[in-house]
Amino acid sequence: DGGITQSPKYLFRKEGQNVTLSCEQNLNHDAMYWYRQDPGQGLRLIYYSQIVNDFQKGDIAEGYSVSREKKESFPLTVTSAQKNPTAFYLCASSIITGLHQPQHFGDGTRLSIL
Amino acid sequence: SQQGEEDPQALSIQEGENATMNCSYKTSINNLQWYRQNSGRGLVHLILIRSNEREKHSGRLRVTLDTSKKSSSLLITASRAADTASYFCATGLTGANSKLTFGKGITLSVRP
C-alpha cells in the first residue's frame, strides 16, 4: 500500500539536543511538507519542498532544518535553537501537477522535552 | 493570522443528525479543501472544491463554496459516532504554488 511513514511516533528531546524526525513516502509525489500542530492552533507550515535538492521556508522555519536528497525522503531536524519544540509534527506529500492538490499525511511524531 | 477560520470551534450532535461546519477566508483562492483528523492521527483529505464550483457531493458529505462571501460550508448528513473528529478547511491561494493554508479546525462530537 502506498503512503507516508513518519518515525518515531514519540520522541523526547533533552536541552541543547538536536533531534531528527523521519518522513518517507512511496506515493511518487514530488512535493513534501512539514507542519507543526499545537492545541488550538491548527497546522502551521515549517518547510516544504517541491523538487529534490530544493526546499523553501514556511511560516515558522526558525529553529528547524530540512534536507531533500531523495524524492522519497524529507527529514526534519529540530535544532536546539527551537526553544519551544513540544508539539505534534505532521509530514505530508502531494503531486504538483496543477495547483493545490490534496495532501496525504503521515500519522505524526509527538515531540516532548525531557 | 490564519487564512481559513472555521465556525463553530466545537459542535456536539446526536447520531443521525446533520452537522454543518463553516469556513471563511480572506483572499482569492484556487480551491478549498476539507480534511478530517481523528485524535492522534494525521489528516485525511475529504473533498476539494474549485473556485469556479458552487457545490460538490461525496457520499454523506456536501460542500458549498460562495466566493462572493469568501465562505464554504461542509455538511455531514445522517452523522455517525465514527464521524467524531476534528475537521479543517484548507485554502490554496492564487499564485501560492502548492502550499495550503489550514484553519484551526472544528471539533465534532457525535453522541451515540
Image (tube, coloured by chain):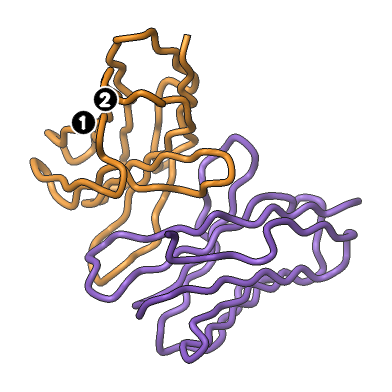
Chain colours: A orange, B purple
Q: What element carries label 2?
A: strand
Give the residue drawn at x 85%, y 60%: B13
* Residue A90 appears left or right of A28: right
Q: In this view, does B112 lie above or below A79?
A: below
| Residue A29 image point, x, y percent | 26, 51
Give the chain of mark 2.
A
* Residue A49 appears left or right of A110: left
Viewer-nearest residue: A63 or A10: A63
| Residue B86 image point, x, y percent | 64, 51
Q: How far apart are marks 2 and 1 (CA)?
A: 5 Å
Mark 2 closeness class: few <14, some 14–19, many ≥20 residues within 10 Å:
some
Q: In this view, does B98 lie above or below A30?
A: below
Instruction: Tell me whether the residue at label 2 lies in contact with that at label 1, contact meaning CB atoms closer than 8 angstroms.
Output: yes
| Residue A57 image point, x, y percent | 21, 46
Task: Identify residue for label 1.
Answer: A65
Viewer-nearest residue: B5 or B38: B5
* Residue B4 appears left or right of B57: left
Give the residue drawn at x 46%, y 15%: A113
Give the residue drawn at x 64%, y 77%: B62
| Residue B94 image point, x, y percent | 28, 76
Give the residue drawn at x 12%, y 33%: A69
Marks 2 and 1 on same chain:
yes
Task: Identify residue for label 2.
Answer: A77
Residue type, label 1: Ser
* Residue A39 appears left or right of B80: left
Mark 1 closeness class: few <14, some 14–19, many ≥20 residues within 10 Å:
some
Q: Residue A73, located in which quarter of the rendered image? A: top left
Give the chain of mark 1.
A
Viewer-nearest residue: A103 or A16: A16
